Amino acid sequence: MSGKKKQRLPQLDPKYRNPGVSGNLPIDTLASGQPYQRPVERRDVKKLIQKWDARKLTPIIVSLRSGKFYVVDGQHRLEAIRQMANGKNVAVPCLVYTGLTYEDEAEMYAELDQAKKRLTLPQSINALLESGSDAEIVEIKRLVEGSGFVWALTTRTGAPFEIEATRALINAYRLLGRADFSRMLELLAATWHGAPNSLRASMLSGVALFLKTYGAQLNDHAFIKRLSIATPEDIIRASRVEYDAALRVARTVREKYNTYPGGLELPYRFRR
């Protein structure tokens, strides 16, 4: 026997143990590709096939819901088996759970794949949104969409009003709180009309820091009027001398705000 450790399934929260029932199911009965799952990567499937060892095959996690078997975890293994089966409806070992809702499945998927460290942050956030289990993430999405933006977690087109910078967005919410986070989004929308570069991580972080520092003194109408003269590219270009991305954008936003003739200047108050 080799010195490699045996693969083990991550331990599930007790609420998912009904318990799961082990059994073999034909691959044609298994439905995968749910919205909460990361897309199947051909590269990963190819690697699985190249290094395939049936002795190390762990059961595919399945939910029996509304008379149908939904794959919660194991869609890459399932796709590898489908390709190797050459069209045959072979049976695969499964661990079947009953009584789960779609939201329960999404939460289980997020917990399993986070334990395996397979999900990117956007993929993990998408799964949490589908499950509805994280109140903070659900609230951020509500505020983002309420301000006319799209939180691009799964499909990214580069279109206006599409926010890809997931970590910066979450950090901005945690820094500002609900009310000022909404204010920040409204300022961004009114000033740069969803221009992709205005929604880069450095811009989100910098405007959030600026708003946190000067929120009570800041005139929103003046911000929109003064900053709309500068493009996001101008601000990013002028900010490159600083190491801290958020600080350098916040400083540049202050400079642009203060250079408007006849306006009330904001004193320097950054502590970073």
Image (cartoon, grey):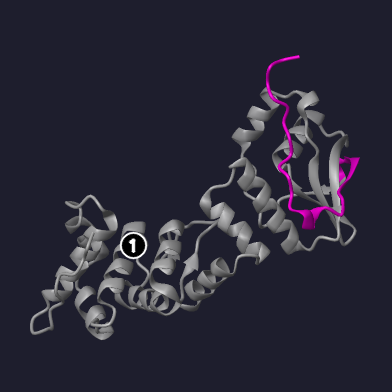
Mark 1: secondary structure: helix
Give the magenta-colored segment's residue range.
1-28
Residue 216, percent from left and from top:
27, 82
Question: Which percent across, then down, holds residue 108?
Answer: 71, 54
Query: Which quadrant holds the N terminus?
Result: top right
Q: Nearer the viewer, residue 264 or 1?
A: 1
**Residue placed at 24% from the left, 81% from the top?**
218
Name the dominant secondary structure of the magenta segment.
loop
Left or right: 147, with 106 as reference point: left
The image quarter containing residue 187 is bottom left
Look at the image and tell me whether residue 39 can be seen: no
Looking at the image, residue 160 sits to the left or right of residue 73; the answer is: left
Query: Which corner quadrant of the image does residue 183 belong to?
Result: bottom left
Q: Amino acid at mark 1?
A: Ser
Question: Camera-side residue: 198 or 184?
Answer: 184
In percent of width and height, residue 18 lies at 87, 54
Question: Disc 1 designates what residue?
Answer: 205
Residue 50 visible in the displayed image = yes
**Can you say whether 238 is above or below 24 in the image?**
below
Does the segment drawn in magenta span residue 9?
yes
Q: Nearer the viewer, residue 12 or 49?
A: 12
